[in-house]
Image (spheres, grey):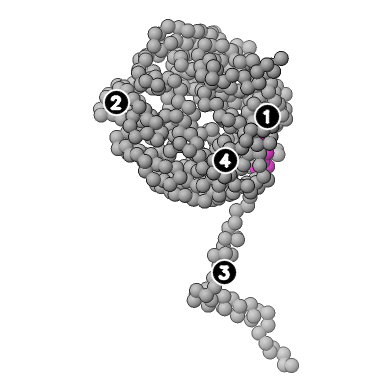
Amino acid sequence: MAKGSGLGVRGWLLLGLITVVVLAATGVWNPFPNLWDWANRSQPISEPDVVWQQRVGGTPRSVTIAGDTVVVEQRTRVEARGLATGGKLWERKADWSAVAGADRDAVVVVGKLLVKGYEVLDPTTGVTRRRNGDAVAVWTYRNLLLDARCVQPTDCTISAWDPRGTAPLWTAFVPGVRSGLLGDNPGLLDTRRLDALRVDEEVAGPEPAPGLLGFPIDGRVHVLDTATGRVLADVEPGREERLSVVGGRLLRISARSQDGTCYFNISARDPASGRETWQRPGLNLRTADGAGCAQRQDPQGARNVLLGVAPDGREAVLDGYDGRLLLIGANEERVLAVDDRYALVRAADKGSVSGRDLGGGRIRWSRPAGPKASAALTPYAALIVDEKPSRVIALHPRTGAELAVLRTSANALAVGPNGMIIGEGREIGYVRFGGAAGAPPGSGDNPAPGPAGTGDVPVPEDSCGPKREACPDPDPGKDG
């Protein structure tokens, strides 16, 4: 046989490539999309793997579980995905979006920056349920939606709506709104939640509407009753005061500079009568920065409770309604998260995190955690995010039973009744509580009650009320 006969390896490869190109060009067979999908396939964002993982259109600004859908807010758009599979249901252009209502009664509110009005969308279909062309601001809660409209800068109305309602529940008149009050959920005078690394600040979804709200208007505070729309008070803070509305009380927080330090005092008043109901001196609610006594921030806390620092350096949780001390930490202990039911506390040796009852301080559970661990409380789960190794852990808030333990560097974005959304960059994934990955949630997924750790997903307590009357001890007679 003569040398050089035949195509050789390179020749056959070239012929094969030409054949594939011809087949692709004529539409007979095109392997390139599948090859690109294979090359672009995302790596799992956690171990164990999530139920589903999807790449969204842009980096999420917020993620909310709304019934059987997942609402993803991005910079210039909002999209909804099915909770069962992560498949996209709809997408809309929007500069801002927020979720109002709870579970299957939830709605998505969208709007554009510097443009009046908003739309209320169905989270499953994206269909517009209601339009408003006049509002300059919207506040969204689990049980209420508020909007503000202004005919003139000093002539405004605030209206309350059921999230899926078509007529306002009440309308209140206020003398204007503060400068720049546009978009969704502009700041009111209430509490400031504790920050948690790798946990989105809106991980718990919309909160229940407080009984009273404090609107800052032209240097004064207008206190509004959310049940009736009645304006109960119109108060101007003193020169050394900061006002806040917490637990049905108007708090006057004073910070006085003397002898090179700040002296704090809290006076709580009934907004309707102006009568002082309680007073507590010496507790620092961290409203002033380290440079002096000027109070530029809301007090730390959540819902009806406040978090402060006593003169001896110990942290304390305070009832906003009657001033009771609900929890006093030991030296060097730090409260990582708090709501009106529980507190998550890091031990003085920074080696563990415990769940504590408010009102008695009883330790419900404790587990090892690194010195840089962060934590958050939601209606359905307590979250602990640890480093080295990097983990996201979801626990039953009352018992500490493990709902999910993930080895991941992703962030916790949203928590719902039966699972949570984690995300890293544009990748988001759904983690089911108390079940193996890959088992998608069914319609109306509500596990039957059982022993902790076997599908015992906690039921949310929307509000314990100012005196915790709506949240009795779940284990009566076991306090010992």
Look at mark 4 in the image and give the residue it sits on.
445
Residues at marks 4 and 3 touching, judged by CB atoms closer than 8 Å: no
Q: Which circle marks residue 31 in the picture?
A: 3
Nearer the observer: mark 1 or 4; the answer is 4
Mark 4 lies on a secondary structure that is: loop
**Mark 4 Cα shell of 10 Å, populated few (<14), some (14-19), many (≥20):** few
Quarter of the picture containing the N terminus is: bottom right
- Sequence-wise first label, 1 or 2: 2
Q: CA distance from mark 1 to mark 2?
A: 47 Å
Query: Percent x, y for residue 226?
Result: 40, 22
On whether residue 344 falls in the magenta region, the answer is no
Q: Nearer the viewer, residue 84 or 367?
A: 84
- Residue 319, compared with residue 435, is above or below; it is above
Look at mark 1 in the image and give the residue it sits on.
400
Where does the magenta region start and end? 403-408
Q: Residue at x 68, y 42 (%)?
A: 407
The residue furthest right is 1
Quarter of the picture containing the C terminus is: top right
- Sequence-wise first label, 4 or 2: 2
Residue type at tag 3: Pro
Q: Residue at x 37, y 30 (%)?
A: 161
Nearer the observer: mark 4 or 2; the answer is 4
- Sequence-wise first label, 3 or 2: 3
Q: Which circle marks residue 156 in the picture?
A: 2
**Mark 2 Cα shell of 10 Å, populated few (<14), some (14-19), many (≥20):** some
Nearer the observer: mark 1 or 2; the answer is 1
Mark 1 lies on a secondary structure that is: loop
Q: CA distance from mark 1 to mark 4?
A: 22 Å
- Sequence-wise first label, 1 or 4: 1
Q: Residue at x 34, y 34 (%)?
A: 166
Nearer the observer: mark 3 or 1; the answer is 1
